[in-house]
Amino acid sequence: MTLKVGVIGGGQLARMMIPAAINLGLDIRVLAEADGMSAGLGATAVGDYRDEATVLAFAEGLDAITFDHEHVPQAILHALVDRGYQVHPGPDALRYAQDKLDMRAKLSELGLPVPVWARVETVTELEQFLADNGGAAVVKTARGGYDGKGVRVVRSADEAEDWFRTLAEDGRGGALLVEELVDFRRELAQLVARRPNGEIATWPVVETVQQDGVCAEVIAPAETSIATPLAENIGRRIAEGLGVTGVLAVELFETTDGRLLVNELAMRPHNSGHFSIEGSVTSQFEQHLRAVLDLPLGSTAATAPASVMINILGGPAEGTLSDRYPAAMAAQPTAKIHNYGKDPRPGRKVGHITVTGDEVDEVAYRARAAASHFQ
Ligand code: ADP
């Protein structure tokens, strides 16, 4: 019988699961938020993921349910589990990707390395944290942030006053996460897949380069350092300790003194793993589908010594990405172009380029040269 998998959320992550599902002969269905979304190809339903009846109707007959984002409310996730659906990652794991305060508390409890952090409810508490931590800190909203939205470097508690006000207006007794401003040498990401039976696969750790809080480039594998061998162990401990099923991305800081600290978690395929479509024997998208269906995981071995992925952010000021194909394809025949079918908009992730090859500098040069055609 054909296996049926449902993806809640219609962004590019759901879109990139579709070719992997086709290759495996899976029946993949997407619940998109609106018409015309990135994953709006094939068996797409349109509806609100915050509405229980909509999600339950979508779930009917599915062998596994997974996600393109982490925003499905806990009550709806539990309603699915209570009705016997296979939900991966499940609500008890996903809560740590939904709330940065819960995540920091859980990782600290498990003894994993994290930046110095605190839960702050008032300007006075934030002032105290700043005084205790050298006068600078990073304040984050616990929920709803992405691509650096909801992250602010502050040197005075007044700079987060508007966020405290929003919390007070909300009236639900919320708090902000504050953490030390980490002096990092670079950012890394460890990608892990875990299936319900406990099998785990890890990819080689990668370096991620951010611009204005948004991932711009990924270099796979990351150049080896004293810290890089620790990443895999951290990834495994988080996947097991939190009971994650599916793909997990662990964003890490490598500090100037050679330590690794966990920044963020994502429990789904992640921008840091897009290189794996061409650069790994099993892509993160195929692996995610295998994992959520509790099938044996594929090899994560590299297909080439180096892969570099460049995001296309914003896209051309005029026209569409495909208008630029003739020039880009002629100039960079080794570049693999991924177009998410989204309208160009400043800063928006509308596609990416991956180049694989023998030598990282040459691969990076070619990838950047190809991406430059789409600005
Ligand atoms: P988002 O959930 O919006 O992606 P992150 O928590 O990953 O937010 O933060 C976005 C970026 O901000 C990180 O990739 C990093 O460059 C920077 N950043 C976040 N936390 C810290 C920190 N404690 N110290 C220094 N830089 C940080």
Image (spheres, helix red, strand yellow):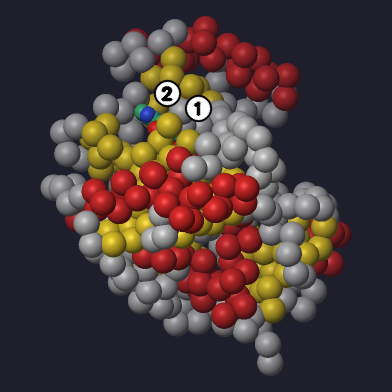
Task: Say left or right for 110 vs 60.
Answer: left
Q: How far across and how far down the image is residue 76, in percent? A: 74, 56
Depth order, front residue of 111/288: 288
Instruction: Residue 13 in the image: state x and y as whole percent.
Output: 58, 57
- Answer with left or right where residue 182 lies relative to residue 195: left
- Where residue 143 appears, as percent x and y from the top left, is 60, 36
In this orientation, which residue lies closer to the viewer: 99 or 368? 368
Q: Is residue 85 left or right of residue 177?
A: right
**Which residue is located at x 32 percent, y 70 percent?**
303
- The answer to whether any part of residue 180 appears in the image is yes
Query: Is disc 2's CB within 8 Å of ligand 1?
Result: yes
Q: Quadrant of residue 175?
A: top right
Q: Are marks 2 and 1 in contact (CB under 8 Å)?
A: yes
- Kindly identify which numbered label has been placed on residue 173: none
Q: Residue at label 2?
A: 138
Label 2: few (<14), some (14–19) or many (≥20) C-alpha neighbours in 10 Å = some
91 versus 133 height, above or below: below
- In the figure, is residue 164 to the left or right of 283? right
- Could you give the CA–CA distance between mark 2 and mark 1, rounded to whole angstroms? 7 Å
To which residue does mark 1 refer? 151
**Three-letter code, disc 2:** Val
Q: Give the quadrant of ligand 1.
A: top left
Question: Which residue does the image show at 48% across and 36% down from the upper left?
Answer: 214
The quarter of the image holding the N terminus is bottom right
Q: Can residue 234 be seen in the rendering of this structure?
A: no
Residue beneath the point at 57% across and 47% down? 324
Residue at 80% of width from left, 74% of height from top? Answer: 60
> Would the CB of label 1 be found within 8 Å of ligand 1?
yes
Q: Residues within 10 Å of mark 1 (few under 14, many from 20)?
A: some
